[in-house]
Image (tube, rainbow, N blue to C red):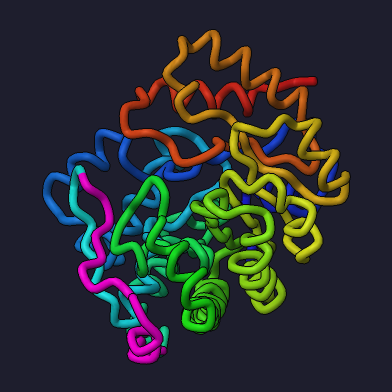
Amino acid sequence: MEKIKNDIFLRALKGETLERPPVWMMRQAGRYLPDFMKLKAKYSFFERAENPELATEITVMPIHQIGVDAAILFSDILVIPKAMGCPVDIITGIGPVLPEPITSMADVDKLLHPSIEESLSHVIKSVHLTKEALNNEVPLIGFAGSPWTILCYMVQGGGSKTFDKAKQFCFEQPEAAKKLLDKITNLTIEYLQAKIDAGVNAVQVFDSWGGMLSPSDYAEFSLPYMERITKSVHGVPVILFAKGAHYALPQLAASGASALGLDWTVTPEYARSLVGNDITLQGNFDPSRLLSPIPEIQKMVKEMIDGFGTSKYIANLGHGILPNIPVDHAKAFVDAVKSFSK
């Protein structure tokens, strides 16, 4: 069994008593780092994500440059629809575009269930190369999008402020929607398990658009699929992050997950009142707050950790880091967590 030198992130997931929380940042391997921007200028998104050498280089960057306690594999949640035969493009300034959106049961029936070894072998190779490059310094996190969030993109045909077409599809054609959610869920379980078997030390499921649903619709179109993933993958801790869906925290906590991610709209006290003290919480610094002056970042990080406590807690942002965050501000956030003392 590998021995990871800095295993504070894994110890927090186990609920061990710690002097300080571990820290990493969602989207840490990316758009705010000058070295990443140089690669972005040279290669398209999928050229970077589907080249294991480049994906490894990008994954490891923030470990050395920012000093986080865990690496998260550079990839994208939309590798799943792409593997299912749904074309995906990521266009600078626009974001993801899926030019052939799903509109009917016939479209759902046409989707592929590919073998991970064939269609997503580049991700598995990235895991192997990244593990080598990290040389057991810190743990590696693998991830996937939640089935509901993937459905949102596949039906809407891209990003949206409302995902009205995705919701309309679920409400007008619930059987087709649930068949699509089933297909995404089955492939996602195989995909995450393949990453675990290749060596990732934890996995996170991003339900980025969970908060678009009402509590009753969340219970129908997202929660059961998140629960199935949590119960089906094995071998490493699972973190669930449902942005904007704090009403679902008690159910997510009961799913068997090791940790729950929180966005910045929830206080530590409120989150704990919903989920109790037996599960690790992760979050929840507002990414925009990294634009505050550094002394203010340091003060707010201390207040955040005082609120959550140092055990069963992983310091992180409440969503992905923004492209316009100065690197020294990102580093100040990480350093403030690492230098925390009670």
Residue 22 or residue 256, whichever sits in front: 256
Residue extending furthest toward the left: 42
- Residue at image position (33%, 79%) is 83
- Residue at image position (30%, 58%) is 158
Horizontal side, residue 95 vs residue 330: left or right: left
Q: Which residues are magenta?
A: 94-113
- Residue at image position (49%, 44%) is 26
- Residue at image position (76%, 47%) is 280
Q: Is residue 124 visible?
A: yes
Q: Is residue 132 visible?
A: no
Residue 263 or residue 39, whichever sits in front: 263
The quadrant in which the C terminus is found is top right
* Percent of width and height locating residue 188: 51, 75
Q: Is residue 190 above or below residue 322?
A: below
**Residue 111 in magenta stretch:** yes
Residue 88 or residue 15, whichever sits in front: 88
The quadrant in which the N terminus is found is bottom right
**Residue 151 in magenta stretch:** no
* Percent of width and height locating residue 149: 48, 61
Q: In the rendered image, which quarter is residue 105 located in? A: bottom left
Residue extending furthest toward the front: 172
Horizontal side, residue 181 vs residue 96: left or right: right
Q: In the rendered image, which quarter is residue 56 located in? A: bottom left
Q: Is residue 273 above or below residue 171?
A: above
* Percent of width and height locating residue 215: 67, 54
Residue 270 or residue 125, whichever sits in front: 270
Q: Total number of numbered labels?
A: 0
* Percent of width and height locating residue 199: 54, 70
